[in-house]
Image: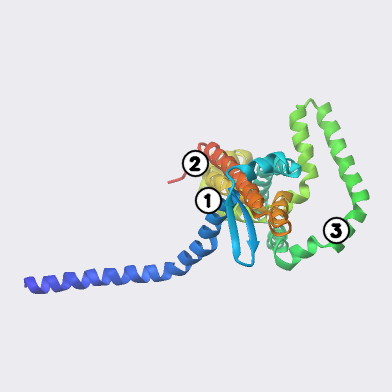
Amino acid sequence: MKFITQRLAGKQRSYGKQKALWGIAYVMPWLLGFIFFFLIPLLTSLIYSFSTVTANSEGIGITLMGMKNYVTAFTVNTSFNRMLTEAIVNMVVNVPLIVIFSLFLAVVLNQKFLGRSFARSIFFLPVILASGVILTLESSSLVQAINDQNAGSGGLINALGSFELERLMLQAGVSETIVNYLTGAVDRIYDIVSQSGVQILIFLAGIQTISPQLYEASKMEGATGYEAFWKITFPMVSPLILVNMIYTIIDSFSRNELTELIRTTGFVQFDFGLSSAMAWIYFLAITIILLISAYLVSRKVFYHE
């Protein structure tokens, strides 16, 4: 009897090892890709940022230079400081606007009305347009020329609209800081709409998971739609506010002139050391903003059990 028990225990252990091996086999492609296409290039760029990199017939030569590339990025390259400041300011301004706009649109698109599916697809369309060939076409010289041709009339209309909005709000006694923020939002309307597709989809999925019984109970208690939003909808989707905020910050990595400056410095001027230093400075700035934002927002998040 003892022999049979030992054999069964051995088979169970071998079955567990077999499952573990299968798990490792499934994870191995991702693990190899992570090591060779992410971890090694990441560490290599960190080494490059402290070095002078030269390429010749014998290969790539690396000469350690300490913090010289970081000092050069801040003191010699005048465009870097300006672009870094603009990227951070635009991120701080755009992220709240995109998250608020996405939540508002998700609540609207969750209502029942004629053409709801079509309206949802319209607001998700910028996500499709911002990929592949269409993104290249959008930034092409032909489209840029058309935009420049229309910039006179379109820019004038936007300027007049912002000026009129600013005048009305100042007459109403609204704070100048709030007025400047809102008029800036009007000027950024294209960027806000084009970058809100994924966030709207995430909020919409979260809203649809809320039990309709909660709204029915609140309606029976006499709650208005405004009260239902702040007491039910907003707390239930607050974890997704954190998710969308983090996604929007990370998404801003590839949506500014600074990334183009880093690419040009590395692959046009072939100054890989300075390019790597710029990339790491930008990465650390984004990481600090991300950690601070996640800490502040996570304190207000409501997790439903």
Task: Say what amino acid the circle numbered 2 marks.
Answer: Phe
The residue carrying mark 3 is 144
N-terminal of the pair, mark 1 or mark 3, is: 3
The residue carrying mark 2 is 302
Mark 3–mark 2 Cα distance, whole angstroms, equals: 45 Å
Q: Give the vertical position of 269 relative to 11 (above or below).
A: above
Q: Give the vertical position of 146 relative to 156 (above or below).
A: below
Q: For the point 52% across and 51% down, which residue is it?
A: 210
Of the residues tagged 3 and 2, which is closer to the observer? 3
Residue 162 in sight from this viewpoint: yes
The label on residue 210 is: 1
Mark 1–mark 3 Cα distance, whole angstroms, equals: 44 Å
In-front residue for pair 275/4 = 275
Q: For the point 79% across and 43% down, which residue is it?
A: 186
Task: Give yes or no for contact between labels 3 and 2 (Cβ–Cβ under 8 Å).
Answer: no
In this picture the colour scheme is: rainbow
| Left or right: where 294 falls relative to 2 | right
Mark 2–mark 1 Cα distance, whole angstroms, equals: 14 Å
| Left or right: where 16 falls relative to 6 | right
Relative image position of residue 98 (x, y in whole percent): 68, 46
Q: Residue furthest left?
A: 1
N-terminal of the pair, mark 2 or mark 1, is: 1
Mark 2 residue crowding within 10 angstroms, few (<14) / some (14–19) / many (20+): few
Q: Give the vertical position of 72 relative to 203 (above or below).
A: above
